Amino acid sequence: MPQLSVRTSKQLLIGSVEAYSGKSATVLGLAMQMRSQGLDVAYAKPIGTCPSEDGSDNNLDEDVRFISQTLELGADRIRPTIFVLDEPTIQQQLSQEKPLQGPEVAAALAPQDEDILLMEGPGTLEEGSLFGLSLPDIADTTQASVMLVARYHSALVVDKLLAAKQKLGDKLIGVVINDVPKDLIEVADTSVRAYLERHEIKVFGILPRTAIMRSVSVGALVHQLNAEILNKPERIDQMMVEEISIGAMNANSALRYFNQAHNMVVVTGGDRFDIQMAALESSTQCLVLTGRLSPRKDILERANDVEVPILSVDFDTLTTVDKIEQAFDQVRLHEPIKVACIKHLMEQHFDINRMMDTLGLAPAVTA
């Protein structure tokens, strides 16, 4: 007969040293791994940073909606978002200057009868300070352990993690280094890992960069660009773009260039019909036309045949590219394909047993 282990409820606050480091993905991947160990998991995001897009609920964060639906969490396993970090809320706080009281925060995030409450923290260590809800504030109030997610730009990632260790002290139980380019994996997994471990910062995982996790849905581009969709392709929220190509050369050069790319969005002028047709003959997921010019009928027909959405925007090419690059830099975890990807990454590159041992958690069922 399996024996249930004796457990007390734990709290883990997942934070980062910079925004868009992969916190939501890490929380989701961690939750899936913990549940595979038989643990009862609850989720909280005290500060909402991604308001409901349909306007139906200003206090419902889209990350909370997606993660709770993906994990099929019951209402008793989702803690309410304390507030959404939008401009009206910030202005109100600037005029009133009423930080949230510790007991109020502690009550909202109090453990119940779950095995572990995973709390997704602010985007940086400082975000939320205006409200008394920075990551160190939350950790102090709830007495939660902290795990940080850091995006790998270079080996100097250690600077930010050492500074975080100084601020968080023993509350920091370890880190995940995310989005490591393939050619830098060896350095991250040897020199960087060894240095951090010598300075008493446990490295629970080093996750390699993948095109899927850095991709953006066409639907997200429509929102980012305030674009008009000129045809009616299906599944724009499931069509993923991995790179940008600018159509500013002649058609022959463009076709050679496009054939070297993969799952791209092509940005070109609305009057560059030769580039538009070349893009539709390659691995194009989305065609963005600048200048609000309508494409020719044969372009639209070809786009419909190959199921490539054509977007029309008011911006010039450089502004359009800049906005698309912002979308890549601010990628969110709202697509099913990314769920499967982070599940695989965490299974392969994250030491769940070491992390659970550090937290004092045991699998729910032992043989």
Image: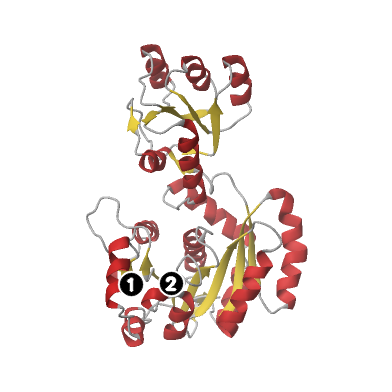
Amino acid type for the residue under numbered disc 1: Arg
Direction from residue 90 to residue 200 in the image, left or right? right
Quarter of the image for residue 260 reads top right
Question: Which residue position is annotated with label 2?
Answer: 119
**Do residues under tags 1 and 2 come within 8 Å of each other at their CB atoms?**
yes
Q: What residue do we see at 32% from left, 83% from top?
A: 107
Specify the farthest residue to the left. Answer: 56
The relative height of residue 251 versus residue 94 in the rendered view (above or below) is: above
Q: Nearer the viewer, residue 141 or 37?
A: 141
Direction from residue 73 to residue 180 in the image, left or right? right
Tell me, yes or no, if residue 8 can be seen here: no
Amino acid type for the residue under numbered disc 2: Met
| Residue 359 numbered mark, or none | none
Quarter of the image for residue 66 reads bottom left
Q: Coloring scheme of the render?
A: secondary structure
| Mark 1 or mark 2: whose residue is earlier in sequence | 1
The relative height of residue 215 versus residue 13 in the rendered view (above or below) is: above
Q: What residue do we see at 46% from left, 85% from top?
A: 140
Callout 1 secondary element: loop
Residue density around tag 2, few if under 14, some if 14–19, many if 20 or more, within 10 Å: many
Q: Nearer the viewer, residue 104 or 350?
A: 104
Question: Which residue position is annotated with label 1?
Answer: 79
Q: Nearer the viewer, residue 204 or 231?
A: 231
Residue density around tag 1, few if under 14, some if 14–19, many if 20 or more, within 10 Å: many
Callout 2 secondary element: strand
Q: What residue do we see at 36% from left, 58% from top?
A: 50
Cα distance, mark 1 to mark 2? 9 Å
